[in-house]
Amino acid sequence: MQPQHAPSSHPSESEGRSAWKSDIVSGFLVFLIALPLCLGISLASGFPPVAGIFTAVIGGVVSSFLGSARLTIKGPAAGLIVIALGAVTDLGGGDAQLGYRRALATIVVAAVLQILFAALRTGTLGDFFPSSVVHGMLAAIGVTICSKQLHVLLGVTPAAKEPLHLLAEIPHSLGKMNPEIALIGVISLVLLFGHAMLSKRVAALKRVPAPLLVLLVAVPLGLLFDLDHEHTFTFSSEVFSVGPRFLVNLPSNLLTAITFPDFSAVLSSTSIKYIVMFALVGSIESLLTAKAMDMLDPEKRRSNLDKDLFATGVGNLLAGLIGGLPMISEVVRSSANIGYGAKSRLSNFFHGLFLLLLVAFAPMIIHRIPLAALAAMLVFTGVRLASPSEFVKTFRIGAEQLLIFTFTLGVTLATDLLVGVASGIVLKMVVHLLNGAPLAGLFRPEIEEHNAEGQVVLRVRHAAVFTNFLKLKKQLARHAQAQHVEVDLTDAKLVDHTVMERLHELEGEFSREGRHLHIRGLDQHRSLSAHPLSARKKGPKGTLGLSS
């Protein structure tokens, strides 16, 4: 009999028979959320609106049966907007269509890398990157999304291109905003932020996803303002124009929208940069989401992260070949999927199927959606990624975490994602060295192993930090049958937050498998904050501790 925690590569017959009704319902509700987000993410990425639909359809209809994590929803994600738009802009040289086709080529090559990652069993890649760096990167993505989409929400085309300059231009756009477009955008934003509060007062709204509520209001407003026809109107003695350019435009025939990649510049340094970013950032985000959804799974089933990465890679390969955006396991839609009662990966399949049917047979419905409403959804997503609560949460874990978080955020905004993440990792290693971690021990931990009376003891010396955790995890994996495993950190001068967090996750996994993982030896260390998973350091209590 297959253990409860063992991964499965495809939906079993019993899974399908018992779950398909719940999965149809959850798939349909997620489809309602995914539709506007797919369109908005496409437009924000410099891709045609239909590109996001292509990706979600492939992510649902194809990837579901390739080993995809059970309850995740695959599709385009806000976290990759910055990379996608950068690829289109930098590779096009002013020609948006050429930039789009060359960006598709980078997606295809990045997908091949992801498939290679899966073949090499690098599903543990998500364990390497420290939380503070990942969250700093996501916060930077959130700020960048807001800096671009606030102008769209106001109906203004900004002159600036870079995030910091776009933020500085917001006051100018507020003064020049198009009243009708801005009204649609602001009302949409209010509904998104106020949905939770409104649901408490109006019980019926609890069953209506916030994005759907926005469309139910924004589409009639678009019809009221006759956005389907080019015309002008006067407001406060100033003349403004509106028309179809403020609505989503989709081709009437889905097959005519298929676009093939242009590989002519795929070996250029610019293309290689974006290939690396698509492959690494997409893989990390997808793996982290799959791990998070496993923890939310009511049945506590574990996903095979290597198979999930393979499913993501194949999906990206197909999407890139026909004109789609890159896909990941997306956290917002996946969380909603679980909340709506999904039982298996069939919910992801149905979500993709519903999208395919709508775009194939009723594209004019999508044409009625105002771009300002989609911009509001992206601003809402961006604010959540860069929420002030993230800064507070990070600070509570440790002041050094906030330093790394804000440094990664700042460098990413000033440069790009790859430089920002690399800079955050380098800063974290410098902090470790300042706290007495030996340089040699940063990458190769010294682990002594003892087996006695059915108990495995792993004693870690020098340091237990993010750069050497994968070796510790690999050694733990060798004892998959041991009922009692102990990790002794007595001789580790430094135990960083990332390792504390990962060991806490492993304790939960062991417990769900009916096994026991015990962490000992931390009584001689001091915590750098009151947070239970804060970094621990050996040393006098009066010294200043910096760790991560």
Image (cartoon, helix red, strand yellow):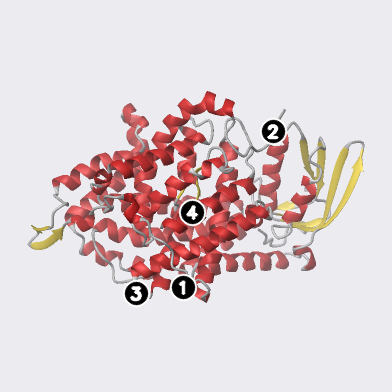
Q: Is the residue marked by circle 1 packed among few (<14), some (14-19), or many (20+) residues within 10 Å?
A: few
Query: For residue 44, which quarter of the picture?
Result: bottom left
Judge the density around disc 4: few (<14), some (14-19), many (≥20) Cα neighbours within 10 Å: many
Task: Quadrant for the N terminus, please.
Answer: top right
The image shows residue 530 at horizontal and vertical percentages of 64, 48
Residue of label 2:
512
Q: CA distance from mark 4 to mark 2?
A: 36 Å
Q: CA distance from mark 2 to mark 3?
A: 54 Å
- Single out the mark in the foreground, 4 or 3: 4
Tally of numbered tags: 4
Amino acid carrying label 2: it is Arg
Q: Which residue is mark 4?
A: 318
Instruction: Look at the image and tell me in which quarter the C terminus lies.
Output: bottom right
Provide residue 38's location: percent of width, then percent of height. 38, 49
Per the rendering, the mark at residue 264 is 1
Precedes in sequence: disc 4 or disc 3? 3
Residue at the image point whose x is 28% and y is 67% from the top: 158
Which residue, given by chain and number where applicable, does mark 3 sit on?
A: 94
Say whether disc 4 or disc 2 marks the residue closer to the N-terminus: 4
